[in-house]
Image (tube, grey):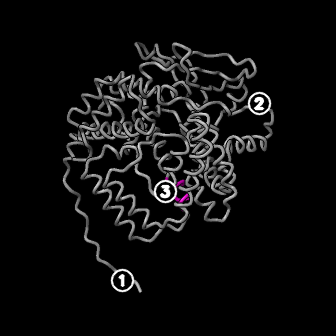
Amino acid sequence: GAPRRTGPAPAGSGAAADRPAVVRTGAVKGSWARTAARLRTAPEPVAAVTSGEAAAGPVAVPAPDVPRLRHTVLATGPDTLPYADLRTDPTAGRLTDEPGPELVTAAWAGARFEAGGTDHLTGYGARHVLDGHPARLADLLRAGRSRELLSPVAALAGADRAAAGVLAGALRTPLTVVRAAHRLARSRWAEALDDTAVKLTLRRTSDGGGTAGTRSADDLAWVVPGPAARWLSDEALSAVALRLRLAAREPAPGEHPGAYRARHALHRHARGFRTLVHATEQPGQRLHAPFLDNQVVRAARLLPDDVRLQPGARHALLRSVLAGTGRTDLPPDWGRGPRPDRTAPARAGLRLAADGLAELFDAPLLAEAGLIDLTAVRAALARATDRTAALPPPALAGLAHLVATELWLRRVRARRHGACWTGLPHPAHPVLTPTRFR
């Protein structure tokens, strides 16, 4: 991102004159607009922001190999942890167009975007756009390309062998994944929705635990309940099951199950980024996710499934793209680092915001509407704030959905009275006479 530049102080006296004036870089109307005077000066530095826990605050780290790069390591503190907004006034945050789990991480993302400057580029969406969804294994079976399942199944078996032992990796994981892929390849749309409705009614939802092979096998389905489904009330689950049974009577989608699941997962991820932008964007700043551009998404959809399902496919694709632009000096282990631990900051934020969470779910609007089982939600929150209790990542994701939805409802109600869309007379619409065209 291009960092914000400060110019001379504005004319006047008082506190306003002491603050430096922010020189706009054209981020709103196009960051490519540069005046001739600025082009004759030295090139402006480029800011790179990463998150870490080694420093006590935002620290500029020099980069001798790239003189124009201003690298900032943003430390994880109490004010940037997830659920940090619950420590003060939860209703004081921004009201987005729709709820989303990104509301609970708005403080952490906002600190990164503030350090980035006027133009901020993020890799949001790379995994969903370039990686192959596990349900695409069934598409390979439908196309008669069963041999191409060997490489991704072997990668899952290797990961489970290192985490759960030789028996789970060498025998249980391949059988579980291949059996689930064959079941999805043979299942029809109506039968899959009816089966999901029965599982919801009987509360037979997966807890998201287990090995990587087990989680991949759970994703091999036309429809998968969300992470917060385990805490919905019986009435809400019955209503969702009824909608599934009604949808089963409609025509089936005209695409394979893997492509269907991957498209909807990408749509949910893109909606999450839009919520993140609404919650954290700074005035005069433009947030941009290049991987969610229409051209990038369309180009990625043209890639064959067997290419995207290979281990390390995302890094190989990005390396090929960079090689096409002339960048061939990447190190051999580029992009092979371990994934960052998302559960530790979430658990730490839940512990710090325990009082705010207890107040938020003292009389929640979700329970007032009959949507959640309040006793089960409180038990899950107590378990999440306990250092010794184990909690799988899907359970943390479900709690983030519940907390974000309750926050959004509270903010809507706090802004309702006196707002411009309430208390006004209903507009009188003229009656339209239907006209029949031949």
Camera-side mark, 3 or 2: 3
Q: Amino acid at mark 1?
A: Arg
Tell whether position 262 is magenta: yes
Residue named by callout 2: 331
Q: Is residue 357 left or right of residue 145?
A: left
Please name the residue shown 60% across and 49% down the image: 174
Question: Who is closer to the viewer here, 4 or 250?
Answer: 250
Q: Main secondary structure of the magenta part?
A: helix
Mark 1 and mark 3 lie on one chain; the one further toward the N terminus is 3
Q: CA distance from mark 1 to mark 3?
A: 46 Å
Please name the residue shown 27% across and 33% down the image: 378
**Local crowd at mark 2 within 10 Å, few (<14), some, or many (≥20)?**
few
Residue named by callout 1: 436
Q: Specify the segment rendered in magenta.
A: 257-264
343, above or below 57, in the image: below
Q: Amino acid at mark 2?
A: Pro
The image position of residue 62, as x and y in percent, is 67, 16
Q: Amino acid at mark 3?
A: Ala
